[in-house]
Amino acid sequence: MHCLHESRTIYNEMLETVKQQYEDTGTFPGKYDLTSHFKGRGGEHVPATTVQTLADRLSKSLKRFLACQALTTRVGFPRFKGANRWHSLQLRQYGKDCYLHEDKKHLIVPKKLGHFLKIKLHRRIEGKPKTVHLVLRADGHWYALIVCETEPQTEHSPSTCTHADIGIDVGLKSFLTDSEGKTVDNPRFYRTSQRTLRRKQRQLCRRKKGSHRRRKAAKNVAKTHLKINRQRRDHHFKTAKPYAEGYQRIVVEDLQITNMVKNHHLAKSIMDASWGAFLDILTAKAENAGHGVIRVNPRFTSQKCHQCGEIV
């Protein structure tokens, strides 16, 4: 926790340096300039490689901001991080500063972080590990995310699926309907949890700012949101798997979800369904199985039958 707090402080100091230089010279410092300027700033709690990743993180935020400004996209300038907006650390140089112990139960980290971290490895590491992200979730548990570099898969095992093509149409009344007539119910995880969220958020508003009880109430609200997110993600994976493995080619609409949520009558339901995340998971699963997902223009995909007048 000391490292998390100190890294946030260093990031805010870097951002202050960036703003000051821009006011003085009209330019932004690069990540190497920030790294050089804050060399040794980590002290007793923050590893030197983590300070480097902080500079890289801020530099990427600035580049993203400038790129979006050129495209006239509304993206705000990087802002200072409070304690409730800073939940992760990044460790570079896997194999030197951090690596998995032979017993597969401990993660070796720099001495400033304790040298040994007890972990539960829930899946086999594939590819070449590059970095480690230590993330603090709303449930109070730390998670070690080992980022690996893998070679692009060029050869796939022969497909065993018995179906060639299928079309999938996502919606709100039903989560999806395929071209074979099958439907998947929309679970509406956020909608069903709104009563619980409403009660917990009212409790949060009644607590005095800065008090221990307010922090506890805020944690309860965050836990509820985390549960909803996990329920939704689990549903997406379980729904996508049979389609990704059972069909050689899957056709979906290339929806402009950003524009669709501008409809304030449907925005909450669209975000609750999270079509974009589902389609990304479906695409990744299909590629791993050696199959393909084709996204088509949604224009004119719904038409009126010239005989009966039904919308198909």
Image: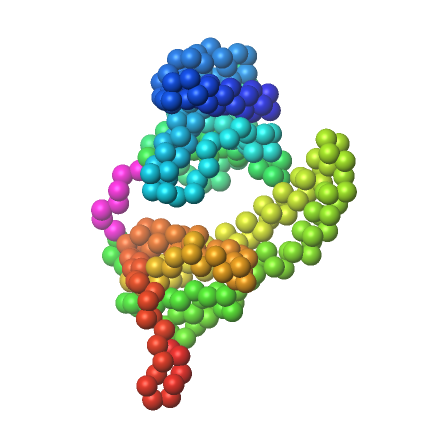
Q: Reply above or below: 212 against 294.
A: above
> Quarter of the image containing the N terminus?
top right
Of 18 and 125, nearer the camera is 18
The colour scheme of the drawn protein is rainbow
Question: What residue is shown at x 68% (from left), y 43% (from top)?
Answer: 220
Q: Reply above or below: 282 against 220.
A: below
Q: Please state if 262 lies on the left or on the right of 33 as rendered.
A: right
Q: How many marks?
A: 0
Question: What residue is shown at x 55% (from left), y 53% (from top)?
Answer: 231
Q: Please state if 190 lies on the left or on the right of 91 as rendered.
A: right
Of 89 and 306, nearer the camera is 306
Question: What residue is shown at x 49% (from left), y 33% (from top)?
Answer: 144
Q: Reply above or below: 251 against 54.
A: below
Q: Is residue 195 visible?
A: yes
Q: Quadrant of residue 304?
A: bottom left
Q: Is residue 100 visible?
A: no
Residue 169: x %, y % from top left: 40, 67
Of 103 and 249, nearer the camera is 249
Residue 14: x %, y % from top left: 47, 20
What is the magenta range?
Answer: 150-156
Q: Quadrant of residue 306?
A: bottom left
> Quarter of the image containing the C terminus?
bottom left
Residue 223: x %, y % from top left: 63, 44
Q: Is residue 289 magenta?
A: no
Question: What residue is shown at x 39% (from left), y 27% (from top)?
Answer: 59
